Image (tube, rainbow, N blue to C red):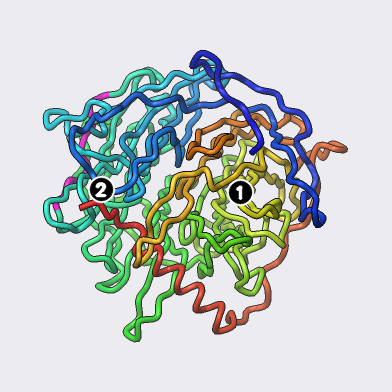
Amino acid sequence: MRGHPGTIGGAALLTLLGGCGGGSGGNLAPGQGPPAFSSVPQVRVSQPATFGACTGVTQPGTLYGGTAVEPSFVVNPTNSANLIAAWQQERWSTGGAQALNLGVSFDGGMSWVVTNADFSVCTGGTTQNMGNYLRASDPWLTVSPTGLVYALSLSFTGGALLAGSSNAQLVARSIDGGSTWSAPIALIADGSSFFNDKGSITADPNDPGYVYAVWDRLSTPSAGASYFAVTADTGNKWQTARSIYDPGPTNQTIGNIIVVLPGDILLDIFTELDTASDGTVSAALRTISSIDHGTTWSTPLTINTVQAVGTVDPQTGKPVRDSSDLFSASVSPKNGTVYVVWQDSRFSAGQHDGIALSYSSDGGQTWASPVQVNADRSAPAFTPTVNVRADGVIGVSYYDLRHDTVVGEILTDCWLVTSSDASTFHEVHLSGPFDLQRASQAESGPNNTPGYFLGDYQALMSNGGAFLPLYAQTNAGSQTSSDVFIAFPPATAAAAAAQPVAGAARAFRAAASPAAMPLAPAARQRVMERIRRTQAGRLPQAP
């Protein structure tokens, strides 16, 4: 194992590591050892947890102590030095974590203090403050133009749709930049008849009073509508949650995210998983829109099909729990173009996933054909995140397995690519390789097959002219352990797309989508198996 940044005395340590690669990497020659871990400057955001046996209840599954996964991240628009993060802390194999931790920095990310909201009993949740749940998951942050920060949690007890279970979408608010949090408000709370999954929350960048939350409300393992809640008074009162799109009794949405376009046009983007009468399944990115703060919504439009096969270790076939059938979206502050990235195997004829990017410059009415934006196209790439800077430069972070050539380890790297035109990109190595086998495992699929898990999503923001990736990676050693890190790519690397600097990053062209033709039958079968694993894996198994 290769070492990487840590902490001294519990305080975050900014560690400069040399040898961070700007090249393409690639497979190692036979007999050659693995490359040493390297990174751009990093700060560890997550800190060791002290929850202990906080629930007092025996729960099924494996609890992975010392794990931080699935971060969310915002920058306060009223104070660029104020960064707020959230992540799952102490992950369970059977779904969710003991708690969501929240972190706050007032020096641009150089040091962090961990805070909490009452989202589960491990962080103070009780029946009196709405947080009386054993587990929390799916953290999501947003910040208003006036600096009010909102945190959303899927909090639950028991398995999804099982007798005695309960779950809720809880939102807490901070008026001091993330240092303290209000008692949570339940946007929706259900028993065993429904499961409210994969929530996201978006503050309106044009009107500080409006905040929008959206999620998937499952009624059966194969059926789930998109649900929506809105506040017009900065979160003091939320309208009753309601369905805004129901794809039908054998279909479901997953990963709803609202983005706000110029003119206060709301786009709810989601993946729709459809099950046909013959049992075949398919996935597509779709969107609905609203021009009246979510009071009414359009009929859905399709962005593109999703043909992810999911990530496995090429050496052993061991599965990775990645963001298959999910996506990331961002709107350009410069011109309102909305970008979407996701995993897709179309570029390799179904052999492995690459990172697909599409965009719309007409309010989500039409979408460009997807292009492949990961630099090394021979290696599986997964869990992409997109952000667009104020000057219109696009950033996409992701993991890949280009260095995974050592038996007994799943060597994984994290990368950032940037572009000013969605055509020519520049690649910067963020960190790695680290061994993904040190990650917690998340059970998924019909047989609860475990997959190595750093999160269904990661985070990427921009602050002025700099991109700030926030992501989970495993720690050195032989124990299961992971932390959330913020990375600081060089300023020349962040600006390389707009004004290339010699030696700062490797330039490459995005690959066009192959000609419209269906995948071969074997590849189509792999895509369908991936969708079925997604359907099964999104339901926590804890009774």
Nearest-to-viewer mark from 2 and 1: 2
Q: Give the range drawn in magenta.
A: 182-191
Left or right, 139 with respect to 126, comes to right
Q: Position of residue 30 (x, y in %)?
A: 80, 57
- Marks 2 and 1 sit apart, C-alpha to C-alpha, by 30 Å
As shown in the figure, which amino acid type bears the numbered disc 2?
Pro
Query: Is 186 one of the magenta-colored residues?
Result: yes
Residue 236: x %, y % from top left: 23, 30
Mark 1 is on which residue type?
Tyr
Q: Report the residue marked by disc 1.
A: 399
Looking at the image, the residue that sits furthest to the right is 502
Q: Position of residue 534 (x, y in %)?
A: 40, 63
| Along the viewing direction, whichever of 48 and 96 lies nearer the viewer | 48
**Residue drawn at (76%, 46%), measured in percent from left and top?**
33
**Badge 2 is on which residue?**
60
What SS does tag 2 mark?
A: loop
- Asked if the magenta segment contains residue 267, the reply would be no
Between 293 and 235, the residue placed more toward the observer is 235
Instruction: Spot the residue most to the top.
Output: 9
Residue 505 lies in what quarter of the image? top right
Q: Which residue is drawn at 51% across and 51% down?
A: 328
- Position above or below: 290 against 107: below
